[in-house]
Image: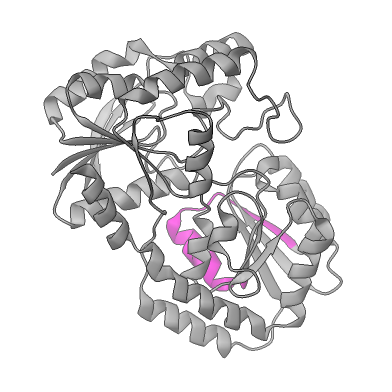
Amino acid sequence: MRILLVNTYYYPEIYGGAEYSVKKLAEELKQQGHTVKVLCTGSEAKCEVIDGIDVIRVVSKNLCRGCEASKYPLYKRVIRRTLDIWNPFNKVEIDKVLEEYKPDVIHTNGLYDLSTVVWEAAYKKKIKIVHTLRDYHLLCPFTSLHCSKVEDECPYVPPKGFCRVHRAINRVKAKYVDVVTAPSSVTLNLLIKNQFFTSSEKKVVPNATEFDALEINKLLARRKNAEAHTLKFVYLGTLSKQKGIQWMISSFNNLSQDAELYIAGKGKLRDYVEEQAKNNKKIHFVGFLNETQVDELLKECDVLLCPSQWQEPFGRVVLDAYKHAMPVICSDQGALPSLVDDGKTGFVIESGNQQALTAAMQHYVEAVDDICKHATMGVEKLNLYSLENQARVFCEIYK
């Protein structure tokens, strides 16, 4: 089968879990014998091979790229977001890729910078279209249902002004999609509730990860035999309010016993995190890490924190914790409670509850044996999220 995966960004441009998910899926599909190419945007047009996958980078016909928008004046950002809804100037380049590669199926993910013109181009060439919801971009131009105009999750139902136009046009364009998938029912149901994909087939396909059972068991054994040490908590991800950075740090600062907190990532709150690390020597900011560096960090830490304060479509960092034999403390937002079994593979905490988050951290500081106990049960869940199974499910959808 000839498969074209589409996402706004692709390795080495990593801005979140979507980029990792698309990369892993592309590699597994090729491993299973399919012909796979990736279409994404870039700062320059080029074709390259990354870890065995053919990657086509196109330059979006817009005033600036989404990942660089904050550097530009307001009028350019407004025009960029308008073209993000439907950008006809990208159609020529997309048509060229489809004509040359002739895929049997096009599987789209993030479409900002490219826009839903990708669906229209594929539809006109009678190519089957599968779309995976990895955020809320079709509902919200800011992708997360949060923006500077509102303090918490967007209360505008129906939305107002530009957001209303954005949602209405995307709803119309969604008619081109044959099958829509999402890594959790939380995300899929929210789009269905807002009358998207009314004629599309719908399916939940969880995110997946590669793992080595032998190596995980070695990590478990090492944790069980480890000497007493200062407990290390770790956070991986975007440094933003929606991700619960401030809630996490203030809760950590209230711990009554010694522990350390390692924070890895990038985002708007980087200055805040660096300041907190400067003021508290138990907090360590290690910047943005590649996959190898993340692997090494997780091996040295004990408990992963996932304090999101938005409707997480999935939360693949939870899988990263399980395959490193770690329990997880997460919030009750989005799909996270479906990944973490409260009191078994970690703890699920009410979003924003500082006392509860501090108490969960304190539990692991005082009951160290529960780290290995909960980690063992987390490892047992990994078979539900294997790349092999995920790729097979998608191949059935592609047919």
State the residue in front, 206 or 39.
206
The x and y percentages for residue 260 are 72, 67
Does residue 238 appear in this view?
Answer: yes
Q: Is residue 145 magenta?
A: no
Query: Quadrant of the image for the N terminus?
Result: top left
Task: Report which quarter residue 3 is drawn in.
Answer: top left
The x and y percentages for residue 160 are 65, 16
The x and y percentages for residue 189 are 50, 41
- Looking at the image, is 294 positioned above or below residue 50? below
Q: Is residue 290 magenta?
A: yes
The magenta-colored residue range is 283-302
Name the residue: 50% across, 13% down: 82
- Say whether residue 103 is left or right of residue 354: left
Does residue 114 appear in this view?
Answer: no
State the residue in front, 85 or 324.
85
Query: Quadrant of the image for the C terminus?
Result: top left
The x and y percentages for residue 84 are 46, 19
Name the residue: 38% across, 51% down: 205
Name the residue: 19% across, 29% down: 127
- Looking at the image, is 375 positioned above or below residue 172? below
Count the marks: how many?
0
- Say whether residue 180 is left or right of residue 279: left
- Say whether residue 261 is left or right of residue 335: right
- Looking at the image, is 399 positioned above or below residue 354? above
Q: Tell me how the rendering is colored.
A: one colour
State the residue in front, 342 or 299.
342
Name the residue: 49% across, 48% down: 185
State the residue in front, 67 or 279.
67
